[in-house]
Amino acid sequence: MSYVLVFLAILMSFVVWWLVKQTVNLTPWTATSSTDAVRSDGVHSAGTSQPLPSKKLALGVFLAVVTSLFALFISAYSLRMEYGDWRPMPEPIILWVNTALLILSSVFLQYGWNAAKRQDIGAVKVGVVVGGALAVSFIVGQGLAWSQLSAGGYLVATNPANAFFYLLSGLHVLHLGGGLVALRKTLSRLWAFENGQEDWPHISLGAELCAVYWHYLLAVWVILFGFMLST
């Protein structure tokens, strides 16, 4: 368990580093978005003035809390597996496929974030849409994995190892589902931007936060999956 906790500590450090980097490097003229922002094509777009760093701060705090939550569950997992009734579960091949899907989803959202820096709205759409579709595929794949395991007799109540697997993987899917809500909001803002109803800083911020959140959830899944494979 010690190496898993080390990885979680590194993950927490990354969250803190990202948060500090965003707030320390912030300049006064980027602290708030203009209420009358000018789009890249010269069209003025009305937008509400919002402190951009506030959402980054909220995400950073949220990720720190989630990291602590997963650390507690992994600690409980490690302690419980010392009992004699613990029976490790098999790892369906589909879990490896799901991991690949989540990696690709994270890659496309990074692509969308990079495109947002260039104000390339077409590329941002591709990154957000494809990344979101791959994330949905991951969730569907996790459901198939649960179905396969249940059909094989690995039910929640059959063994503590089963219960922990469903709990941890289900909790991860729940957080990913919350990310899809944010992804949908970012996509809606992209359509609004094309109609002159949204300003670019909010879209760029949304693409960044979604990418960071996806990278985080990918790291959490790799840690969880690796830990379950090792036990």
Image (cartoon, rainbow, N blue to C red):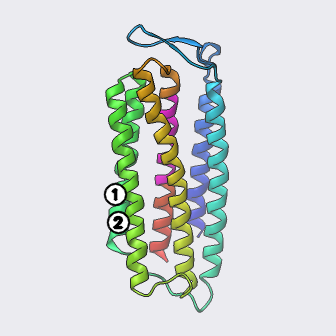
Q: Give the x, y percent position of residue 196.
A: 45, 17
Determine crowd level at label 2: few under 14, some 14-19, many 20+ residues with C-alpha closer than 10 A. Answer: few
State the residue position of label 2: 96
Identify which residue is drawn at 59% across, 82% down. Answer: 81
41 falls in the magenta region:
no
Locate the N terminus by quadrant: bottom right
Q: Between residue 132 and residue 27, name the one nearer to us.
A: 132
Which SS class for mark 1? helix
The foreground one among 129 and 85 is 129
Task: Assign a secondary structure to mark 2.
Answer: helix
Residue 30 in view in this figure: yes
Name the spot of residue 201 as percent of width and height, x first: 51, 22
Amino acid type shown at disc 1: Ala
Residue occupied by mark 1: 100
Q: Residue at x 61, y 13 (%)?
A: 29
Residue stretch rendered in magenta on the structure: 205-218
Residues tagged 1 and 2 counted as in contact (Cβ below 8 A): yes
Amino acid type, callout 2: Trp
Q: Is residue 136 left or right of residue 161?
A: left
Residue 117 in which image quadrant: top left
Q: Is residue 61 left or right of residue 162?
A: right
- Examine the structure image and report whether residue 206 is included in the region drawn in magenta: yes
